[in-house]
């Protein structure tokens, strides 16, 4: 099965600086890579995703890059703000059919943005 | 947008009792739903894949007789934790998708005393 490794487990940055979280995956059949932000006690919220036919995707201050050959993908947050503080999870999935994705999650990164 | 509703949001039960958690897709049909468990400060771990009209597929190490899953319609999947024990206390989250992306329910905080 798929195995997703995520680093670092904790990350502290000054407000306004950039934050980078990296993930690797093992299953070459995986073709969908979402990133989730989870605040304490709440459900994960999708913040950005990328598919294997794309190398990079950007949405305002958030970007994700994918290197299929090396089987790794990264989340980049620029101009960080205190409200970016949360736990971030990467995930990987092959397409399960019928419009469904069975995700394997990384262990999470606790991001703290220091004002 | 697609919404997944999960109920209850929290429940406290006594050891030995059973608890049922519902997961509904509100504006789309989901032939497949997923159930995750999340212990404090840990990642989401897939427990099982719920398939409408057929038996659920359980991940290794998850007891199918303890965590009963029923997916009787295209919009509802239920997870029943049977004979609950304190170690079953956790945050249970369901998810479903329609093409993509995956949508999560709000989760259920289960505390077994």
Image (cartoon, coloured by chain):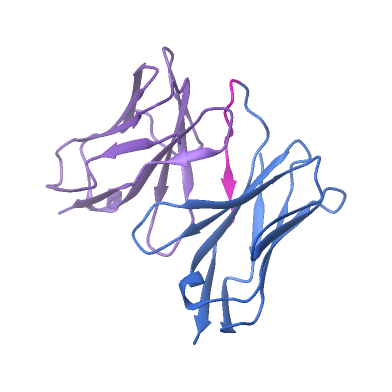
Chain colours: A blue, B purple
Quadrant holding the C terminus of chain B = bottom left
Furthest-left residue in view?
A: B14
Residue B85 percent coordinates (x, y): 22, 47
Furthest-front residue in view?
A: A60
Q: Nearer the viewer, residue B37 or B9?
A: B9
Quadrant holding the N terminus of chain B = top left
Furthest-top residue in view?
A: B53
Q: Nearer the viewer, residue A88 or A55?
A: A55
Residue B32 percent coordinates (x, y): 48, 24
- Position above or below: B100 against B44: above
Instruction: Give the magenta-colored segment's residue range.
Output: A98-106
Does A110 sit left or right of B53 as displayed?
A: right
Residue A109 percent coordinates (x, y): 56, 67
- Position above or below: A52 against B49: below
Q: Residue at x 36, y 22 (%)?
A: B75
Q: Verify whether residue B101 appears in magenta.
A: no
Does B19 sit left or right of B52 as displayed?
A: left
Residue A38 percent coordinates (x, y): 45, 59
């Amino acid at each position: 099965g798929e195995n997703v490794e995520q680093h670092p487990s904790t990350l502290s940055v000054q407000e306004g600086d950039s934050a980078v979280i990296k993930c690797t995956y093992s299953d070459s059949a995986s073709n969908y890579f979402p990133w989730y932000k989870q605040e304490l006690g709440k459900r994960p919220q999708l913040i950005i995703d990328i598919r294997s036919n794309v190398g990079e995707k950007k949405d305002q201050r958030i970007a994700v890059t994918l290197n299929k050959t090396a089987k790794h993908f990264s989340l980049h947050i620029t101009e960080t703000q205190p409200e970016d503080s949360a736990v971030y999870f990467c995930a990987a999935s092959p397409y399960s059919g019928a419009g469904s994705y069975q995700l394997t999650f990384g262990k999470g990164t606790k991001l703290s943005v220091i004002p | 947008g697609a919404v997944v509703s999960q109920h209850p949001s929290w429940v406290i039960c006594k050891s030995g009792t059973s608890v049922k958690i519902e997961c509904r897709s509100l504006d789309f049909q989901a032939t497949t739903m997923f159930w995750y468990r999340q212990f404090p400060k840990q990642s989401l771990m897939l427990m099982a894949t719920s398939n409408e009209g057929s038996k659920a597929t359980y991940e290794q190490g998850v007891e199918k007789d303890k965590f009963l899953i029923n997916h009787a319609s295209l919009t509802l999947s239920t997870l029943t934790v049977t004979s609950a024990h304190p170690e079953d206390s956790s945050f249970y989250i369901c998810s479903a998708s329609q093409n993509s992306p995956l949508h999560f329910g709000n989760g259920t905080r289960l505390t077994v005393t």
